[in-house]
Image (cartoon, grey):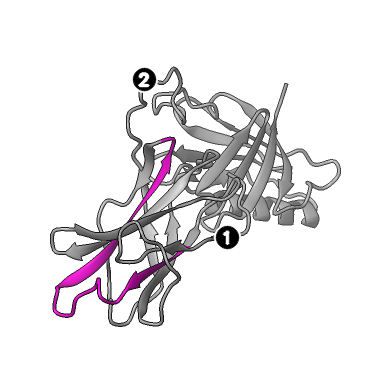
């Protein structure tokens, strides 16, 4: 999933069901961001739903849905305007829930409400997890099933960029992950070895070990940047014969192409 600018849209809501009107001066505005850790692009036509619930018990109070414009990427920013008459003083605590839907199916949802202070709303981060509803008798699921064979395994990749810069002329940096998740290749100077992990974040790497050959200073500096990029990796995007590794902020770290 290639990160782009944050998607900004407003989810507006009033107490009168079926009667939409501009936000009034006595509205309470809850703002925040919805994000998820999986590197999965949202399908076209996805929707974000924000629901204000009463705590404890997560009883729904009000909610609203807005379209995710274009091929948006997380985090998705939201602003939920609620009439102050809906949030009753002394009515207990409140929380926010989020869902991302497509074609009537929930793709991502928050597992627990995020508590909010209705008297002094603060910017709220809502983490949703990939927990799709079963398809409605569709011939194909919107997203690949979880038991799809891992396309990263048993493939040799050539590095095309490190931190947005191509490898130095005459240096070939390679990378591969075996079926037992052992990873490694050649850094342009040394052979290196590490272990790939696919639990939790979509892709991480353990400590890197390797041979101890000494090369030109520029090659050694490139090797250091490459190893640091692998250490910061938490996700990836695979498109055809190209692969990109990303850090926690969604910044591309390493670009690769499949060897023929």
Q: Which residues are magenta?
A: 78-103
Magenta stretch contains residue 92: yes
Q: Position of residue 227 (x, y in %)?
A: 61, 50
Image quarter (top left, top right, bottom left or bottom right) of the C terminus: top right
- Tag 2's secondary structure? loop
Q: Marks 1 and 2: which is nearer the front?
A: 2
Q: Position of residue 175 (x, y in %)?
A: 63, 35
| Residue with the most extreme front position | 19
- Secondary structure mostly seen in the magenta stretch: strand
In the picture as drawn, the residue positioned furthest to the top comes out as 139
Query: Between residues 149 and 94, which one lies in front from this camera angle?
Result: 94
Q: Earlier in the sequence, mark 1 or mark 2?
A: 1
Name the quadrant containing residue 132: top left
Q: In front: 164, or 44?
A: 44
Q: Which residue is mark 1?
A: 6
Q: Is residue 165 magenta?
A: no
254 or 46: nearer the eye? 46
Up/down of 158 relative to 79, above or below: above
Q: Is residue 51 visible?
A: no
Instruction: Examine the image and state in which quarter residue 242 appears.
Output: top right
Residue drawn at point x = 30 percent, y = 59 percent: 17
> What distance separates the C-alpha of mark 1 from that of mark 2?
34 Å
Q: Name the residue that disc number 2 marks.
A: 137
Q: Residue at x 29, y 77 (%)?
A: 84
Q: Residue sitting at 33 percent across and 39 percent down?
A: 131
Residue 147 position in % (x across, y down): 39, 24
Q: In which quadrant is the N terminus drawn?
A: top right
């Amino acid at each position: 999933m290639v990160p782009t600018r944050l998607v900004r849209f407003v989810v507006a809501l009033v107490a009168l069901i079926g009667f939409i009107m501009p936000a009034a001066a006595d509205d309470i505005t809850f703002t925040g961001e919805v994000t998820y850790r999986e590197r999965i692009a949202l399908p076209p036509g996805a929707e974000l739903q924000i629901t204000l619930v009463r705590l404890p018990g997560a009883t729904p109070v009000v909610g609203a849905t807005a379209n995710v414009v274009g091929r948006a990427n997380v985090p998705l920013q939201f602003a939920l305007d609620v009439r102050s008459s809906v949030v009753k003083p002394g009515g207990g605590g409140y929380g926010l829930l989020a869902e991302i839907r497509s074609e009537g199916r929930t793709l991502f949802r928050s597992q627990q409400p995020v508590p909010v202070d209705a008297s002094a709303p603060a910017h709220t981060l809502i983490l949703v997890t990939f927990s799709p509803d079963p398809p409605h008798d569709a011939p194909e699921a919107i997203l690949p099933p979880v038991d799809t064979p891992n396309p990263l395994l048993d493939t040799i990749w050539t590095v095309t960029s490190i931190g947005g810069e191509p490898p130095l002329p005459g240096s070939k940096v390679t990378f591969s992950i075996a079926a037992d998740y052992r990873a490694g290749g050649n850094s342009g100077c040394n052979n290196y070895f590490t272990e790939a992990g696919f639990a939790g974040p979509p892709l991480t790497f353990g400590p890197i070990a390797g041979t101890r050959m000494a090369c030109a200073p520029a090659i050694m500096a490139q090797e250091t940047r490459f190893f640091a990029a692998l250490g910061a990796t938490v996700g990836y995007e695979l498109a055809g014969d190209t692969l990109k590794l990303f850090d926690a902020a969604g910044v591309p770290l390493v670009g690769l192409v499949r060897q023929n």
